[in-house]
Amino acid sequence: MIEQFINFVIRPPRAEYNPEQYLWDKEFSLAGRTYQRQDLELKNARGHTLQCSHYLPSPFPEDTSLPCVIYCHGNSGCRADANEAAVILLPSNITVFTLDFSGSGLSDGNYVSLGWHEKDDLKMVVSYLRSNKQISRIGLWGRSMGAVTSLLYGAEDPSIAGMVLDSAFSNLYDLMMELVDVYKIRLPKFTVKMAVQYMRRVIEKKAKFDIMDLNCLLVARKTFIPVLFGHGSDDKFIQPHHSDLISESYAGDKNIIKFDGDHNSSRPQFFYDSVSIFFYNVLHPPQVSRADKLEKYYDLGDLKLGSGVNENLIYEILSSLRSATADAASSSSALPTISTTKSVTELLSEVAPSADLESVFTEEIAHDNNEPTNDVQDKVNDQTEDCFSCTSSNRESWGRCSSLGGSDEESCADLRADNLPQNTLDVFATPLRSMKEKCSEAKEDEKKLKKNKSKIKKKKKKKGETADKKGKGDRFEKLEALSRRLRHCLLKGSIHRRHESS
């Protein structure tokens, strides 16, 4: 029985697997992006060869360094345990490195040490990543033995950005005493203590470490790396109070999450979400580059913006527009939120009907030029500075650029006469077709806009008799101010692009 307990500590069942079958492919796609698995071998201080894998974007971004999370498996685990970590972190531009510790999986070595020698293997991996200029910050994610390994190493290397510790034990000696009760070994306490002392000597002789040195409470007091603890509430192998004890002793920023499940059960999605957010905050990965942003124009639903326009500012203004149309009697102090997954057309339709928006933008342009709304087109025809007006041909499309300085016909003639280069024409909100089509479309838009304005005026007269004039005036005043910001933002982007091309 004692030999079984010894093997339980230093020689648990060893994972044997085929990397091509149990790891991610050499080239694979995830969330619409392509990644690669790079296999490599590292040699630790004891001369053991460690089998490692590094999951990276393919191709790797040029002139950019990405953070990396090292996943540390449990006492009977291997590199395949990091497959879930890769799915969670790679879409956030965080690379994932994983290895078979010495004595585990396909690496060399005959025994594991529950974190004592594994921390030296981890040190070798960190040193390798530090020498790689493509890697910036480094985080650690460990489970069971891997969590203890991460904590032991983190106490020696404060440069680690953050750690996730799932089901770590606080003290190996206390854990062994608890397992005696869990497995209902009916022996007197003094007999158990004598057996543990015998095991201590045998383990030290075979695996070259002292089980009394594996005390996470001692190192937790001098570790200041931000940490997220996780533990299954039904864990009978390493009970949840172990994470509680470590958390109480931990000196740095910390948080702990308890979830349903035992020691080996799969973790719930909310825990993985918390891990993703934690590493995003501590590692600060670069923003994920979307494929549509590599093209000429940003795709925001029916509205297309030239690449010189600040998309985030557009969404900020739209969020403010939504807030301005909210009930004035609302006393909520919460900041308005906006879903960036919605198209601009959907956001604008939530703020006000398309016809109302058209009138607001048209009135705002006339207000800037000190002209009545009815005379907007006459004013635009007389303008000589570079500007554009946004019109709509239907209630589901907003943002088509109808003119670029002067009236529609004059702008088309000026562009032909000036022979502007192609990149100068990028200030249009939609890709250029033929100039004749633009002019004809613009004329139709103007006619429809005039009809909409007449309808809007009639509606305003009817509503004005019963509505609160003061509240309505305040609301439209806010809308006009915010729409003016939107217009100037778009105008600024177009002028900037034209200056660059000239």
Image (cartoon, rainbow, N blue to C red):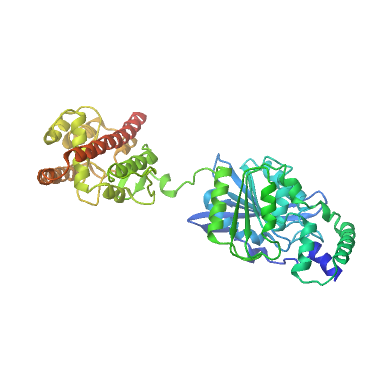
- Which residue occupies the foreground of this view, 335 or 411? 335
> Which quarter of the rendered picture does the N terminus lie within?
bottom right
Residue at the location (74% across, 49% down)? Answer: 217
Q: Is residue 29 left or right of residue 401?
A: right
Q: Is residue 431 left or right of residue 188?
A: left
Residue 478 point in image, percent of width and height:
26, 37
**Quadrant of the image occupied by residue 295:** top left
Residue 309 point in image, percent of width and height:
36, 37
- On screen, residue 202 above or below 479: below
Q: Is residue 435 left or right of residue 121?
A: left
Is any atom of residue 330 visible in this view?
A: yes
Residue 466 point in image, percent of width and height:
13, 45
Is any atom of residue 52 visible in this view?
A: no
**Quadrant of the image occupied by residue 208:** bottom right
> Which quarter of the rendered picture does the C terminus lie within?
top left
Residue 299 point in image, percent of width and height:
35, 48
Q: Is residue 415 left or right of residue 79?
A: left
- Which residue occupies the foreground of this view, 401 or 5? 5
